[in-house]
Image (tube, rainbow, N blue to C red):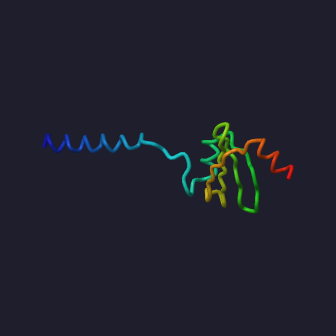
């Protein structure tokens, strides 16, 4: 009986540890409301019918584009900023 109690307690303890595990930052099907709660600095980058694309700045080199359709995340892209020098060369041609 004592071994059964120890077994049950250890299972409950290990199960509760999984609650505190890593929480994915973004996932397919994530709601727009949850995304905006986690990313208060998100700005709308593009509107197209029932699709909205938000831009979130990661750091000085990368940003994320998250596209939602009908309130659910359907596409996630991470992009790198292009240096201004390269943009000037492309524009001068």
For the point 41% across and 43% down, the residue is 19
For the point 81% across and 50% down, the residue is 90
The picture places residue 55, in percent across and down from the top left corner, at: 70, 47
The picture places residue 80, in percent across and down from the top left corner, at: 67, 46
The picture places residue 79, in percent across and down from the top left corner, at: 66, 49
Seen in the picture, residue 69 relative to 89 is either above or below; the reply is below
Check the image and name the residue furthest to the right.
Answer: 92
Q: Nearer the viewer, residue 60 or 4?
A: 60
Seen in the picture, residue 49 relative to 53 is either above or below; the reply is below
Check the image and name the residue furthest to the left.
Answer: 1
For the point 78% across and 42% down, the residue is 85
**Which of the 4 quarters of the picture holds residue 57?**
top right
Check the image and name the residue furthest to the bottom.
Answer: 49
In the rendered image, which quarter contains the N terminus?
top left
Seen in the picture, residue 3 relative to 69 is either above or below; the reply is above
Task: Left or right? Give the position of 25 relative to 40.
Answer: left
Q: Nearer the viewer, residue 20 or 77?
A: 77
Task: Left or right? Give the position of 31 relative to 21.
Answer: right
For the point 60% across and 53% down, the residue is 31
**Which of the 4 quarters of the picture holds residue 62?**
top right
The picture places residue 25, in percent across and down from the top left corner, at: 54, 45
Q: Nearer the viewer, residue 66 or 80?
A: 80
């Amino acid at each position: 009986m004592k071994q059964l109690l120890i077994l049950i307690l250890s299972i409950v303890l290990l199960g509760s540890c999984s609650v505190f595990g890593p929480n994915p930052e973004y996932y397919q099907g994530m709601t727009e409301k949850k995304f905006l709660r986690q990313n208060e600095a998100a700005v709308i980058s593009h509107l197209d019918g029932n699709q909205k694309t938000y831009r979130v700045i990661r750091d000085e080199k990368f940003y994320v584009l998250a596209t939602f359709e009908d309130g659910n995340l359907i596409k996630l892209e991470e992009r790198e900023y292009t240096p201004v020098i390269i943009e000037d060369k492309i524009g001068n041609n």
